[in-house]
Image (cartoon, coloured by chain):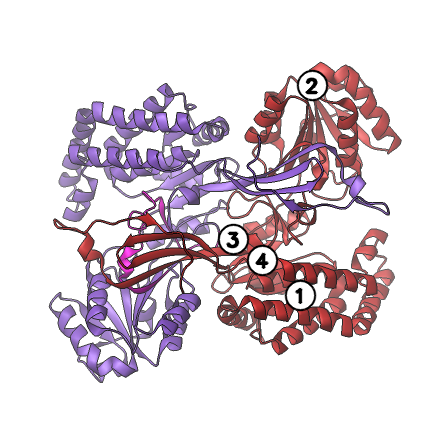
Chain colours: A red, B purple
Amino acid sequence: MSLEQVASAAKEASIPLAAAKTVDKDRALAMIAKALQENGGNVVAANEQDLQEARRNNLAGPLLKRLRFDQAKIAEACQGIESLIQLEDPIGKTLYAMELDEGLELYRITCPIGVVGIVFESRPDALVQISTLCLKSGNAVLLKGGSEAGRTNRILTGIIAQATAEAGIPDGWIQLLETRQQVTEMLALDRYIDLIIPRGSNAFVRHIMDNTRIPVLGHAEGICHVYVDGPADLDKALRIVVDSKCQYVAVCNAAETLLVDERIARAFLPKVKDALGRRSVEIRGCDKTRAVIDCKPAIEADWSTEYLDYILSIKVVNGVDEAVGHINRYGSHHTDSIVTKDRAAAARFLERVDSADVFWNCSTRFSDGFRYGLGAEVGISTNKIHARGPVGLEGLVIYKWKLLGDGHVVADYSGTSARQFRHVRLDRDCPL
Amino acid sequence: MSLEQVASAAKEASIPLAAAKTVDKDRALAMIAKALQENGGNVVAANEQDLQEARRNNLAGPLLKRLRFDQAKIAEACQGIESLIQLEDPIGKTLYAMELDEGLELYRITCPIGVVGIVFESRPDALVQISTLCLKSGNAVLLKGGSEAGRTNRILTGIIAQATAEAGIPDGWIQLLETRQQVTEMLALDRYIDLIIPRGSNAFVRHIMDNTRIPVLGHAEGICHVYVDGPADLDKALRIVVDSKCQYVAVCNAAETLLVDERIARAFLPKVKDALGRRSVEIRGCDKTRAVIDCKPAIEADWSTEYLDYILSIKVVNGVDEAVGHINRYGSHHTDSIVTKDRAAAARFLERVDSADVFWNCSTRFSDGFRYGLGAEVGISTNKIHARGPVGLEGLVIYKWKLLGDGHVVADYSGTSARQFRHVRLDRDCPL
């Protein structure tokens, strides 16, 4: 099959899938979990082959760890599916109901987006999470995983496709792309694909964004900030800075820049240098920072750099407004946190920082679908439309307007003796 | 000012505007209405100059009519502003609240999109509608109207900018672009502009979509269908077909193709020919249609053509599933209507037609923000993300996640003695 045929088949499957009942989708999810458990041995064997090849290719330790999909990971994936079954079906909800006139009723109803193309890194558990989120939200999905996980992804997709076919979900709703060339081809198929969610390096995400008319949901970079305000509890602030920077440096919600109110710079910066020094974090400071602690100088480019490493840039600012200005100018609109005891300053920061996730007195690392209680996530979005921040089921949903009449025509509502619209809000669900 | 400076000023204004209180936005709206009334004479005089020049340039009658902005139009615009003041503020609403753990609370809060660039046709009333919708939803706006309305748009923008400045709305929130070159420049300013809403010809909208990374909300074409099912009331069906096709042919929600169930083709098609013939509508039919009535043959291209004229293509189909298949294949996902007394067939059609607006027993022409009771609209969207169908206030809104803690760090929730998240839904609004 050509990729166009694959995408066309997915589009065709997406129509009955959009109409699938909750009970059928949940039964299909349960059958996926059952099939994963029953075929666990084959999955682990395929994954072992992927791991062996990765070791031969000298893949780095952390990447090998992410690639591993063993019995424990299978059990975890099945638990995830179990929680997804418990979540409410996001489809078919009445968002708005209005009587336009006698016998003419308007309803806004949630429905799936259609066909979603997702490119993800070499974590086989991501394949299970993403595809089950798509199934529950009634979306068909084209998946492209990291090539290192090729064998694992192939067997997982096969298991999911077969289990859902047995449960009556239309064939073709889940399909695996195997080459980079297919990803490139996918970008041109705006006729069949409604949304692309790329996960991966900044350069890769930007490449996708610049080469398709299909809407792209995701983020290119995560330049996250912690701002420690004058009236902060400095012990809490220090824990938050250390966690935001060091708890996991290679991820988008790790902090890259610390902003410090000049009122507490003398008291706080030496504590920061001490705590981060013990964790081998390199500090790059502005002039005012360097007047208090000894560190490398920060250059202009530092404020807009996502290090993803044990490096932190520090700037001293004269209060919350300068912090907000810096973040809105240099940040990536991902996640930013203020540490303060001043409620008004916190409110000002949360309202004016133009980011998907704005935090008060906690670590930027909380920005995550699981921690937010969304179940899994398909990605984290810095878009300003549709979905923002961690994206779970709800970000895979759009709506359609259903208008139910009895022969109503617009001509009756125009001209000199025009009927007037009633526009009365209704408190009921759409009857069909 | 360069366009980059204009856009940067709008972005800067958008931050305090996002934090503006409802009462201040509503007061500013009232001051716009007052200023429009007080300066009515100057507006009409400027519009008269635009009209004179348009007449010299032999602008067509309907276009001249849309260009006219007289005292009656001013009164109408002020009424529109009055209704907008009555609408609920869409900003600052708590969409979701969850306690993640003791003292760690997550809120999803609506907020403005930021800076919206809107290109619209030569209707000065559109300028007032669009800019006041943006103001109420807290968005800064860059406007480019039709050049024929240049003088009118300039004076209207001046009046709105001055009235809102006096009401304390930040300067720069509304700015008028004057040249096509500036529209082209705008497409590159993704750093400052968050959303573009183009209104105009198919070719123009496609050009915009193909030449920017900024999200585009709107529609290129409206290929709308009426499907008359076997068990339809044929008198109602005929009125709906006539209204959908003829009530206003030059608009996106007019019908371009009629699909007729073969069970009623012999009974219904002659009525259609008669009724449309009296209105000088040219019919282009499939072979089965031409076996019943005399008309031009439809060619393949007819099914995907937006005539915007007194032309209708007709195809005989073998029931609701073929109708749905045809619409999903050839339509533009805008507005499609089924006429039937069979409730199950209607439900199947509404669920499976993949369009923004799906109607039962009424005219496609109802697809419109005013008729839907949304107040005004900034456009009609065939997008599959963010907003679909007529777009009013709600389509100009996104959300941010606010997380309120007390020194919480992620390290406490990982590792062997990890704290567990509570994930308890809260039934309250965000306290800040």
Q: Is residue B309 above or below residue B65?
A: below
Residue at horizontal 26%, vertical 24%? Answer: B35
Judge if badges 3 and 1 mark residues of a common chain: yes
Chain of the residue that carries numbered disc 1 in the rendered image: A
- Given the image, on which type of amino acid does mark 1 rest? Thr
Q: Where is residue B320 in the image (x, y as percent from the top left)?
A: 37, 75
Residue beneath label 4, please? A88
Mark with earlier residue (3, 1): 1
Q: Label 2 marks which chain's residue?
A: A
For label 3, the residue is A215
Where is B102 relative to A113, above or below?
A: above
Specify start and end residues of the magenta stretch as a single range: B358-385
For marks 1 and 4, give the one nearer the viewer.
4
- Determine which residue is flagged by label 2: A231
- Determine the chain carrying the residue at label 3: A
Q: Mark 1 points at which residue?
A: A179
Tell me: B415 left or right of A124. right
